[in-house]
Image: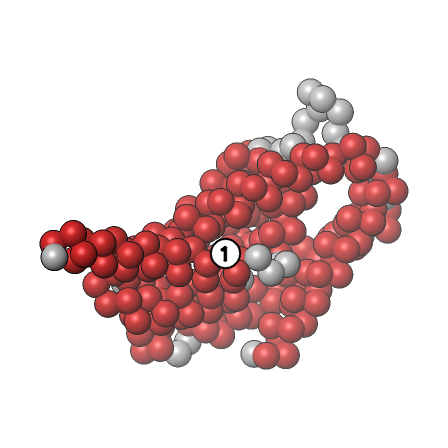
Amino acid sequence: MRRVFNSAISATIMAAYLSGFTVGFSLILAIGAQNAFVLRQGLRGSHVFAVCLTCAVSDALLIAAGVAGFAAVAEAAPWVKPVFLWGGVAFLTVYGLMSLRSAWRGGQAMPEEGQTTGSLGKAVLTCLAFTWLNPHVYLDTLVLIGSLATAWNGERLLFGAGAVSASFVFFFSLGYAAGGLAPIFRTPRAWRMLDGVVGIVMLALAAGLATNG
C-alpha cells in the first residue's frame, strides 16, 4: 500500500514538473524580440553565455513571482500594464529602426576570430531591456504561468520549476546552436538580410503591442 502511495506521489510530482516545462517551453518558443536578440548574439559569438544566462534568470524571477501570486498584485495596480506596454512599444520601435538602418547601410559581417564584438555591459543591458520592457513576457510568466500554477495546489512550485527549466534549456540551446549557422553569415549580404528580418519583426511586434494596447 505504501509503495502504491509513494508511486502516486512521484507520478504527481513528475506530472507537475513536466506540465510546467511543456507550458514554459511552448510559450517561449514563439519568435519574439528577446529570441531574435539571443539568436543574433549566438551568430556573432558575442557574450553568448552572459546573454543566455541573463534571459534565463530574468524568466526565472518572473515565473517565481507569477507562481507566488504577483499577478494579483498587478491587477490591483492598473497603471503597471500601460507603463510597460508603451515602454515596450518605444523600445521595440527604436531597435527595429536601428536594425533596418543597419540593413540599408550594410557593411556588417561575422566578426573574425579575435575581433571585438561589443562590450559585455551593453549586451547584458540590451538583453535586460528586451526582457523587462516586453509586456508579453509579463503576460506569459506572471499572468499565464502564475494562473496555471494555481491548479497544482501543493505542487505549484514544481510546476514553476519545470517552467524555469524550460527557459534555461531553450535560451542556452538557441544561443549556442546558432553558432552552427555562423559560416552562412560571414558575408555582409547575409548579415544585411538578418538585420532586415530582425527590424521587421521588431516593428511588427511594436505595432501589435500598440494595437492591442
Look at mark 1 in the image and give the residue it sits on: 25
Give the residue at x 68% y 27%.
Answer: 116
Work out which residue is located at the far left of the displayed protein and give it.
Answer: 2
Above-or-below relation of 141 to 109: below
Number of numbered discs on residues: 1
Residue 58 in sight: no
Helix, strand, or loop for circle 1? helix
- The reply, left or right, for residue 191 in relation to residue 53 is right
| Image quarter (top left, top right, bottom left or bottom right) of the N terminus | bottom left
Measured from the top left, where is residue 30 in percent x and y? 60, 60
For the C terminus, give its image quadrant.
bottom right
Quadrant in which residue 154 is drawn? bottom left
Q: Nearer the viewer, residue 145 or 122?
A: 145
What residue is rendered at 75% in x and 25% in y?
112
Report the front residue among 126 and 12. Answer: 12
Whether residue 111 is visible: yes
Residue placed most toward the observer, 207 or 9: 9
Which x, y percent locates residue 123?
58, 40
Q: Residues within 10 Å of mark 1 (few under 14, many from 20)?
A: many
| Residue 211, above or below 60 | below
Mark 1: amino acid? Phe
Q: What's the residue at 61%, 67% (across, down)?
A: 89
